[in-house]
């Protein structure tokens, strides 16, 4: 949830809808088509029982939302988090539609989630929850209809359980029903680190177009998890200096730079980046305000708001998370000349390599890691340059340019397909 001017919490869905409406003003759309593109195609809410280790039964609530299927089957992750809401899942599904359209993938957007704290569940409880949730949403998912992937709180093992559950119902193995699986059961090499690596590639290309260099650039990363840690390591290899990082339990800062690999090892040993030897402690919010060249918010949505946007001291914000910047904060950052590289471009590496995995599964023919990375880099670089071109031609910020490009592509497909019946 994010704050509005009144201080009340703003639903992520309202935020996503506002972003869409702002961008749609730049695209000539009939009113009916505009409304069709704005709202989800279908929504499923499920309440299901799970047997716990102590023999008790708990009821969990889960969601699966399809925002669009105009460009192809819907695609989107599944998150396990205590704060999951239907509004959040709607927003994430919409962002996935735009993300896929910008990257030129033959997908519409979807998203799913279960209201739970995966860290409090045993491995057995997590597996039983996953298999029951997969069964409940099996009316929607399928290799040609809706393909889930990992998100916050889920991982390759969760995807393997979903794939196995779906396959048991069908009577044969269906690896293409999910992406982000272990390589041993049809996953793609390079998928696990794709979002973070893609974020670094997009940052490099955006800085280059803005006339800035990544070499020697000072970088702060909020959310040193699956995305943030990989992005930090990749940016470090590209010559950047990681000066700050945080996770849900705290943050650290060092003026001369942090070693991302040492930070990963410290977190693996202690469960957090907090307390890293030789670094100054910070809160997760303070990391957003560290003086730096590039800020990578890679945690959850609604981190940069009207309340703290004026204190963001970065020259460039590269959104590793989905929806980390509210529309009001966008306006404030733009007024100060801060370049914001939006989530629908910056963190698209995950869905791009998910697409590669899906293609490989359907063909039963797999690529090398070098091939995956080369294709990822080429596709993301093209997306950044296309969005930059639209931004320059239309005189709009990068988020608006990205959404304009996405809306145009989806609208063109709507017109080409026609309105059934």
Image (tube, rainbow, N blue to C red):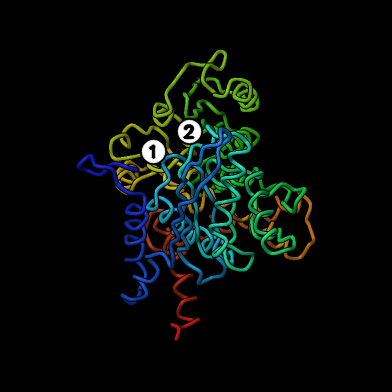
Q: Write down the quadrant of residue 224 in the picture.
A: top right
Q: Where in the figure is residue 181, as x and y percent of width and height?
A: 68, 49
Crowding around mark 1 (Cα neighbors within 10 Å: few <14, some 14 to 19, many 20+) is many
Position of the C terminus by quadrant: bottom left
Marker count (numbered): 2
Disc 1, SS: loop
Q: Answer above or below: position of 354 versus 283.
A: below
Q: In the rendered structure, find residue 222 and report the number of the disc placed on it.
A: 2
**Which of the two discs, 1 and 2, labels the residue nearer the N terminus?**
2
Which residue appears at 66% of the width and 61% of the height?
Answer: 169
Q: Where in the figure is residue 373, as x and y percent of width and height?
A: 70, 50
Disc 2, SS: strand
Q: Where in the figure is residue 337, as x and y percent of width and height?
A: 36, 43
Report the front residue among 241 and 272.
272
Position of the N terminus by quadrant: top left
Query: Residue 378: in sight, yes or no?
Result: no
Q: Write down the quadrant of residue 148 in the picture.
A: bottom right
Residue at mark 1:
303
- Rounded to the nearest whole Å, what is the CA distance between mark 1 and mark 2? 9 Å
**In the shown orientation, is residue 159 left or right of residue 35?**
right
Q: In the rendered structure, find residue 364 and report the number of the disc placed on it.
A: none
Crowding around mark 2 (Cα neighbors within 10 Å: few <14, some 14 to 19, many 20+) is many
Which residue appears at 78% of the width and 57% of the height?
Answer: 366
Q: Where in the figure is residue 285, as x and y percent of width and height?
A: 39, 29
Identity of the residue furthest to the top in this view: 278
Pointers 1 and 2 in contact (CB under 8 A)?
yes
């Amino acid at each position: 949830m994010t704050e509005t001017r009144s201080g009340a919490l703003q639903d992520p869905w309202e935020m996503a809808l506002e972003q869409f409406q702002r961008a749609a003003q730049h695209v000539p759309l009939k009113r009916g088509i505009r409304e069709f593109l704005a709202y989800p195609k279908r929504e499923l809410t499920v309440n299901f029982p799970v047997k716990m280790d102590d023999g008790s039964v708990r009821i969990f609530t889960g969601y699966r939302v399809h925002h669009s299927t105009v460009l192809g089957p819907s695609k989107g992750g599944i998150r396990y988090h205590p704060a999951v809401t239907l509004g959040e899942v709607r927003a994430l599904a919409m962002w996935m539609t735009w993300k896929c359209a910008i990257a030129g993938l033959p997908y519409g957007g979807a998203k799913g989630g279960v209201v739970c704290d995966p860290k409090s569940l045993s491995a057995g409880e997590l597996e039983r929850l996953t298999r029951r949730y997969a069964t409940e949403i099996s009316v929607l998912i399928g290799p040609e209809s809706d393909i889930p992937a990992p998100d916050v709180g889920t991982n390759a093992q969760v995807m393997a359980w979903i794939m196995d559950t779906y396959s048991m119902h069908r009577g044969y193995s269906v690896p293409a029903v999910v992406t982000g699986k272990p390589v041993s059961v049809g996953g793609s090499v390079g998928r696990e680190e794709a979002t973070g690596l893609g974020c670094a590639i997009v940052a490099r290309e955006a800085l280059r177009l803005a006339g800035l260099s990544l070499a020697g650039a000072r970088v702060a990363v909020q959310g040193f998890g699956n995305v943030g840690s990989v992005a930090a390591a990749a940016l470090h290899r590209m010559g950047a200096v990681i000066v700050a990082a945080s996770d849900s339990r705290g943050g650290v800062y060092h003026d001369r730079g942090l070693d991302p690999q040492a930070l990963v090892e410290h977190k693996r040993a202690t469960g957090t980046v907090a307390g890293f030897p030789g670094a100054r402690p910070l809160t997760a919010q303070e990391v957003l305000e560290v003086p730096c060249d590039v800020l990578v918010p890679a945690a959850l949505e609604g981190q940069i708001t009207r309340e703290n946007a004026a204190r963001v001291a970065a020259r460039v914000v590269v959104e590793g998370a989905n929806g980390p910047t509210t529309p009001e904060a966008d306006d404030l950052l733009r007024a100060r000349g801060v370049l914001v590289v939006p989530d629908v471009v910056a963190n698209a590496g995950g869905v791009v390599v998910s697409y590669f995995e899906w293609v490989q599964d359907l063909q039963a023919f797999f690529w090398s890691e070098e091939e995956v990375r080369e294709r990822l880099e080429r596709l993301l670089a093209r997306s950044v340059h296309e969005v930059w071109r639209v931004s320059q031609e239309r005189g709009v910020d990068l988020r608006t340019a990205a959404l304009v490009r996405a809306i145009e592509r989806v609208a063109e497909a709507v017109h080409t397909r026609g309105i059934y019946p």
